[in-house]
Amino acid sequence: MSEEIKPNVAEAPTQDAQLAAESIASGEEKAPKVDFDADYEAAQKLSVSEIDRTAEGAKAAAEATAPQYEVPIQEETVTQAQPTGNPSDFLEMASNVTPGSENASNVTDDLVQQALEKGKPGN
């Protein structure tokens, strides 16, 4: 299916394209005809090389994409927690997650108020 190209002078991206569009619009040159179907078929033929259509091409592709290093097979490990039923184990774990009073701050409201007063300019 052949189609005629109708260039638009206002949409030409370069000066050369603009001059070509003007000469086609004025009738000095004929508009090129484009056969999209033939171009598509030619592109399909060029997208795959001749060697890729043979067994030798498949072998070459396999060699090119083969891993260069040996990858060890992963081993699955199973970890199972042993139930103890001892409540002190849970208390110890909870103290690790939520620290108790040993890490508590000694900042009081009075201390904050003193800091605010000392932070004012002119004192």
Image (spheres, rainbow, N blue to C red):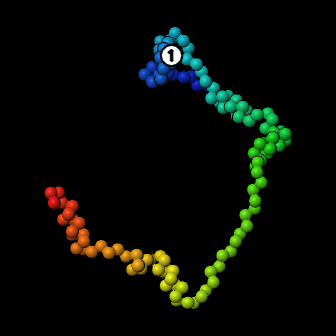
From this view, report whether residue 76 is shown above or below residue 81. above
Residue 95 screen position, x and y as percent: 47, 80
Question: Which structural element holds mark 1?
Answer: helix
Q: Left or right: 2 with respect to 65? A: left
Q: Is residue 47 above or below residue 112?
A: above
How many dots with numbers? Answer: 1
The residue under the point 66% across, 76% down is 79
30 or 60: nearer the viewer: 60
Q: Residue furthest top?
A: 28
Q: Who is closer to the viewer here, 55 or 102?
A: 102
Residue assigned mark 1: 16
Image location (x, y in percent) of residue 71: 75, 56
- Residue found farthest to the front: 123
Residue density around tag 1, few if under 14, some if 14–19, many if 20 or more, within 10 Å: few
Q: Position of residue 82 (x, y in %)?
A: 63, 84
Give the residue at x 77% y 54%.
70
> Which image quarter: residue 108?
bottom left
Q: Residue at x 47, y 23 (%)?
A: 13
Q: Is residue 95 left or right of residue 37?
A: left
Q: Amino acid at mark 1?
A: Asp
Q: Going 16% across and 60% down the picture, which residue do you hit?
A: 123
Above or below — where is 37 with respect to 23? below
Q: Nearer the viewer, residue 69 or 118?
A: 118
Q: Position of residue 118 (x, y in %)?
A: 20, 63
Q: Residue furthest right?
A: 55
Task: Please state, as top left, top right, bottom left or bottom right, where the N terminus lies in the image.
Answer: top right
Residue 25: in sight, yes or no? no
Q: Quadrant of residue 33?
A: top right
- Residue farthest to the left, as pictured: 122
